[in-house]
Amino acid sequence: MTGSGGKEERREAPTPGAGRLLRLTLLALAFFLLLFVAVDRIIDRVHQGPEYTVLPRARVEAAPSWFDTSARSALRGAVEGLLEGRGFQVFDEEPVRVLGRRLIDLNLARSVVARREIPSQVVLNLRVPRPAAWYRWGGRTGLVDYAGRPLGYSLGEEARRALPRISWADSGPPREPGADLAAGARVVGEVERLFLAGLPRGFSLAWVDLSNLDYRLLRDSRAAQVRITLRTPGGSLVHCDWGHPPRSGYTRIPAADKLFVARRLLEQYPLFRGLQSIDLRYRHSPETWVGRRE
């Protein structure tokens, strides 16, 4: 028997798990490299290629119930008109910012938030100002918000019927109706918040008459500066004197005093049945200042 005095070397074969891990690591690195290149090329094409250009075709996907067909059409037309038929690219933020500012300047929106939906949509979330009243001046019909600012959209006749109307004398205001609209909108807000809230359910404001604003009706020095028309729960109209004559020495009459008069008359005339006009300016003996229907 022969033997060897040298040491025998042993080599361990590589485990299969180590090789698999190495291959997976290399594949993952290659995938992320390809993904980075692909995203970089897509962004480059969005900025340069016309196939990702958004054309200004707007649609209203959701809106409150009072925002009717006429209002939706006006909003779509405004968005498309402001873009003037020019496309813009989805990742280009400046045209969207400019569009949002213009919508706010036109009083079509209080705020605008844009959300991009790849590849070809930009969704605008608008906080639209609610109308306080409507008016007619210079052959056109418009809406006004509670701050007295004309709104950039219109409503159809049926939707307008739910709003009070601000009106002037037959000849209209002697100038642009800006100051008159502000005065009328203040009255609408005061009546709704401080007066109608204290009346039985079903009363609404139908009309704000500014014919005697700034002493325009000189033939009657006792006429109220502002008159309102209430619609009763039964559908009849009652005309109310709302304030002292212009340039009167009396101070402004608080809405609480007018509400006191109205409640006192409601005790005698439930829901104002049989009344055609009311003078809300006098707390004492208000029964003597009513006009009864024939």
Image (cartoon, rainbow, N blue to C red):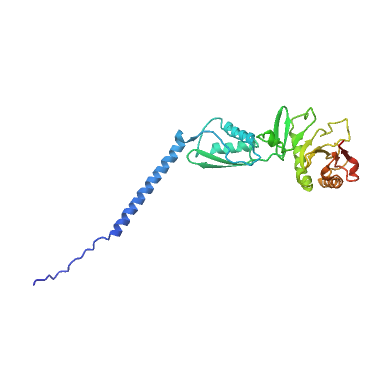
Q: Nearer the viewer, residue 153 or 31?
A: 153
* Relative to 271, residue 215 above or below: above
**Is 46 positioned to the left or the right of 62 in the image?**
left
Residue 142 quadrant: top right
Q: Nearer the viewer, residue 253 or 232?
A: 232
**Is 7 positioned to the left or the right of 281 in the image?**
left
x and y percentages locating residue 89 in the rendered image: 50, 36
Q: Quadrant of the N terminus?
A: bottom left
Residue at the far bottom in the pictured view: 1
Residue at the far left in the pictured view: 1
Residue in view at x 50 percent, y 42 percent: 117
x and y percentages locating residue 229 in the rendered image: 80, 38
Residue in view at x 91 percent, y 45 percent: 285
Residue in view at x 79 percent, y 48 percent: 198
Q: Nearer the viewer, residue 230 or 186?
A: 230
x and y percentages locating residue 41 in the rendered image: 41, 40
Residue 282 quadrant: top right
Q: How many marks?
A: 0
Residue in view at x 76 percent, y 35 percent: 166
Q: Quadrant of the C terminus?
A: top right
Residue 23 seen = yes
* Relative to 207, residue 28 above or below: below
**Is 108 positioned to the left or the right of 279 in the image?**
left
